[in-house]
Structure formats: C-alpha cells, structure tokens
Amino acid sequence: MKVYVSAAFLDTSEVVEIAKAAASDRLVEEPISIALSPPDQGEASLGGGEVVRIVFALPDGEIVVQPVSCIGIPNGPNDAACQEPFVEIRGGANHDVPCEGEPPDGCATPIVLDPEAVAAARPLRLAAFDIPLERLGHHEVEVGRVGLPNGYVTELQAAVGDAHPTDFWVGDAIRLELRPTDPDRPPFGNVYERGTIEGVEEAGVWLVFDVTELSPGAILRVVDIAVR
C-alpha cells in the first residue's frame, strides 16, 4: 500500500523492511504488530529528515520505534523508498548484435528484409487503449495483432497514460510482449538470434501485469502503442 507521510509517497512494505534492518539489534523477537507514526519534525534539516516512524510491538510488551529518513537527493538503495513510485511499461525490440569475439570479428551480419514482405507487413499503432480493471491478480490482455516482415521486429513500445494512478496499483512493471501466433515459432527475443522467415509473420501484442490494489471503476490507459 502506498501512503503519503510527511509529503513523501512511500511504499509501506519497503519502509518497514528498511526499518527492520536498521532496528535489527533491538528486535529480539519477531514483532506481533507493526504501525506507522508521524515523523519527528524537529529532526528535519535542509538535506532531508525523517519521513515516517515504524512502531514495532514485541511479544514481551516492548515497543521499538525506528525512524526512516530520506536525504534531499535520493542516493543509495534505502532512498528508493523516498521516491515517488510510478507505473511503467517494459519491453522493446532487441537489436543487440551478438559477437563471438571482439567486434567486428564474429559479429552477426546485418539483416536485409524482403521488400515484398515489408510492403505486406501490418504494423499496429494505437493512440490509446483502455483496460477496465475489475479484479485483483494476474492479467494478460491482447492489444491487437501485427504482421511482421520476415518475422523481424523494428519497434515495440508503449507508455502508461497516468504513471501515478490513485485508483489502482500494479506489482513490478507492466510487460509489453510479442507472441507468435504459430506455436511452432520460437519466442520473440534478439532479432539476430531468432532468425527470419519468408513472408509476413503473425504475432499478438500483449500487456501482462499484476493488479495489487484496486478501486471500483479503475481503468488502465496505455498510450502511444507502436509495434512493427
């Protein structure tokens, strides 16, 4: 769950783990309850300060309070908790040139596409694609189909319309995937290692994600979809 505490947008599970690590020598037993409390504003400075305090209640009745602080400019693994999290889409065409030795020796040669296949190809371009979110959990949504010249992927990209939604959240990132419709074809990956075929290869464009928080009526809008 993401919450605003002292003007910082925090992932509570992350800050709790940071606090546990910092208070490890005082947590003689596993806490029976964990709560957030306001930071000590007197500890703030121009370079940053406390953003929240984690309160651990131990089985023997002891209360351990561990502050979590952020500096002015996030710097280091702990400060990731102080940055405003965002929803992003990951995925793209892999054009890395594999080489068996030091380039240019042993490197893959450039791929030359058949002009007829290029002319017959069908790209997918969408300004926006809305996905109503009605349940928590894993989602795999087909956005559309493409015809790729010789099975070669030139472009595979999309973006989230609102990277900071307030009515839903997803775990990790949204994955943009290409899937061949022919089950005998290998998965899409590096364009050189996968190899080409004659003509146009059919493929589906999919969005894969896990909804972890949800409010009624939430919609995931994906924009600037371009696959060819």
Image: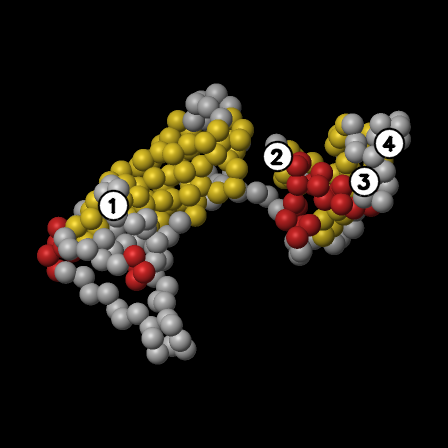
Residue at screen point 21% across, 44% down: 202
Viewer-nearest of discs 4 and 2:
4
Name the residue beneath numbered marker 1.
184
Name the residue beneath numbered marker 4.
63
Viewer-nearest of discs 4 and 1:
1
- Sequence order check: which comes first, mark 4 or mark 2? 2
In the structure shown, which secondary structural element does the residue marked by tag 1 occupy? loop
Name the residue beneath numbered marker 2.
2
In the structure shown, which secondary structural element does the residue marked by tag 2 occupy? strand
Q: Nearer the viewer, residue 2 or 71?
A: 2
Give yes or no for contact between labels 3 and 4 (Cβ–Cβ under 8 Å). no
Give yes or no for contact between labels 2 and 1 (Cβ–Cβ under 8 Å). no
Name the residue beneath numbered marker 3.
66
Q: Is residue 152 in view? A: yes
Q: Is residue 219 above or below residue 43?
A: above
What residue type is disc 4 on? Ile
Residue 104: image location, x then y, percent: 35, 78
Give yes or no for contact between labels 2 and 3 (Cβ–Cβ under 8 Å). no
- Real-space Cα distance between discs 3 and 4? 10 Å
